[in-house]
Image: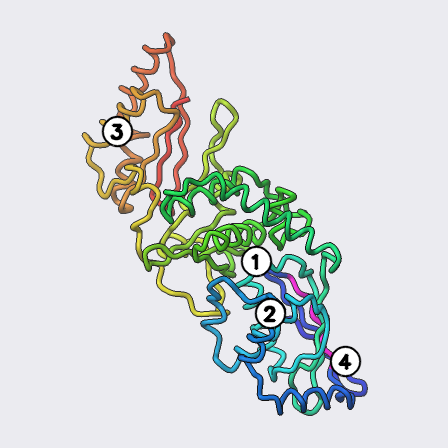
């Protein structure tokens, strides 16, 4: 979002604040006449006719060519491609400030700048603010100055550490694993190795997760994207809001040509309000692993920065893939599932239903009827006790019931 304040002196002074879950940028915009040397530089650039191709060649020469699928670049208006590529190359060449050659308005600059950061989680040294200057003649951005959190001389070393941390995760994944299995493993890995902390260091970037092990949604999602990208798996960053809440960021992946949403942050049990096991452990929330827009948009609202594809397939729904899904409520089927769970000495049973009607019927039979009496009697007999207390967790948005036997 942008908050603007105008002061009238010679020229204009505008202050922009972009505050999102992915990036919080305090941007100062100054309007001025261009100095002669800058005009000369721009004239030379225009006559060179380099455009997008010139910046792509510059990326090759500098050894910073993009190796990932750039979703935001592909969905930007074509007239912004030049600015995107210029901003990307300059950032990757550690040019934290400089003159911008591409012709873009202030609004288009921020749109393009955010697109670069959304496509490239490996840009880990960008801070929370930036300054841009606008030409008093053309009304386009002529220069920028980025706030950074990692000095130039420390970036190579940190990059090596980040790559090693990501590869440590990747090394634990079987070479025969499917794309879904790799996505699921990274999802679980980040949840199991990261603590959520609103005051985490560098929380908007990947080092918060991969090096410091504490972060917020931007760090969770960008680290997830970064690791998958290193494996050649498509993943991009999505910015939006949560209903009745604030800004939030999550991910989008692609499997077999279909797109799915993933919210690693909300997969962390701290967000699911899950019941703890007797051993002190929590249950990972798989509602947000390869979910559909029908499920996610009950709580998440995507922003309008770029067009998003339909995410309607549930082919890789965790509960379907693991035999926890019931399209309808059938008493005998659910009874058998309950008894098999206690006979197998499982700590809990998870049931996802295909409709609200089936879900409501299940809740009634389980918690108001006597459907749990036989599993309870079996547990009392096995453990030699006269009573048995179980806990349960319901999630109305996902038609999900979890019963904890222990």
Residue at the disc numbered 3: 337
Q: Mark 2 and mark 1 in contact (Cβ < 8 Å)? A: no
Residue at mark 4? 7
- Please give the label number shown on residue 355: none
- Give the alpha-carbon distance from disc 4 to disc 3, as whole Å: 68 Å
Mark 4 or mark 3, which is nearer to you?
A: 3
Which circle's residue, 4 or 2, is located before the other in the chain? 4
The residue pinned by badge 1 equals 121
The x, y position of residue 230, in whole percent, is 50, 53
Q: CA distance from mark 4 to mark 2?
A: 32 Å
- How far apart are labels 1 and 3 at the CA level? 43 Å
N-term-proximal mark, 1 vs 3: 1
Q: Which residues are magenta?
A: 24-30
Distance between the alpha carbons at the discs numbered 2 and 3: 53 Å
Q: Give the residue drawn at x 26%, y 26%.
A: 371
**What residue is pinned by disc 2?**
88
């Amino acid at each position: 979002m942008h908050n603007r304040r105008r002061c009238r002196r010679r020229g204009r002074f505008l202050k922009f604040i972009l505050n999102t879950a992915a990036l919080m940028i305090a941007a100062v915009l100054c309007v001025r006449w261009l100095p002669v040397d800058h005009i000369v530089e721009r004239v030379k650039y225009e006559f060179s006719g380099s455009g997008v191709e010139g910046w792509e060649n510059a990326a090759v020469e500098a050894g910073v060519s993009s190796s990932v699928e750039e979703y935001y670049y592909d969905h930007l208006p074509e007239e912004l491609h030049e600015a995107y590529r210029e901003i990307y190359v300059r950032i990757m060449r550690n040019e934290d400030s400089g003159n911008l050659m591409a012709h873009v308005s202030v609004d288009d600059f921020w749109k393009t700048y955010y697109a670069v950061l959304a496509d490239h989680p490996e840009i880990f040294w960008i801070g929370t603010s930036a300054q841009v200057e606008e030409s008093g003649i053309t009304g386009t951005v002529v220069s920028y100055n980025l706030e950074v959190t990692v000095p130039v001389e420390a970036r190579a070393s940190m990059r090596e550490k980040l790559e090693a941390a990501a590869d440590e995760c990747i090394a634990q994944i079987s070479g025969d694993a499917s794309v879904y299995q790799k996505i699921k493993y990274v999802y679980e890995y980040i949840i199991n190795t990261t603590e959520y902390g609103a005051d985490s260091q560098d929380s908007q970037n990947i080092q918060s997760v991969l090096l410091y092990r504490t972060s917020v949604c931007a760090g969770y999602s960008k680290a997830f994207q970064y690791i998958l990208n290193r494996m050649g798996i498509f993943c991009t960053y999505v910015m939006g809001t949560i209903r009745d809440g604030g800004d939030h960021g999550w991910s989008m992946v692609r499997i077999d040509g279909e797109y799915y949403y993933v919210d690693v942050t909300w997969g962390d049990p701290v967000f699911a309000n899950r019941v703890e096991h007797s051993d002190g452990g929590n249950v990972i929330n798989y509602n947000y692993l390869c979910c559909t827009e029908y499920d996610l948009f009950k709580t998440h609202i995507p922003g309008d920065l770029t067009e998003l594809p339909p995410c309607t397939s549930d082919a890789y729904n965790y509960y379907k893939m693991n035999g926890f899904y019931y399209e309808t409520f059938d008493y005998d089927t659910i009874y058998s599932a309950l008894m098999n769970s206690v006979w197998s000495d499982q700590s809990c049973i998870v049931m996802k239903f295909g409709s609200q009607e089936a879900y409501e019927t299940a809740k009634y039979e389980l918690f108001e009827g006597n459907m749990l009496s036989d599993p309870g009697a079996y547990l009392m007999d096995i453990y030699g006790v006269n009573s048995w207390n179980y806990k349960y967790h319901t999630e109305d948005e996902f038609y999900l019931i979890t019963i904890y036997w222990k």
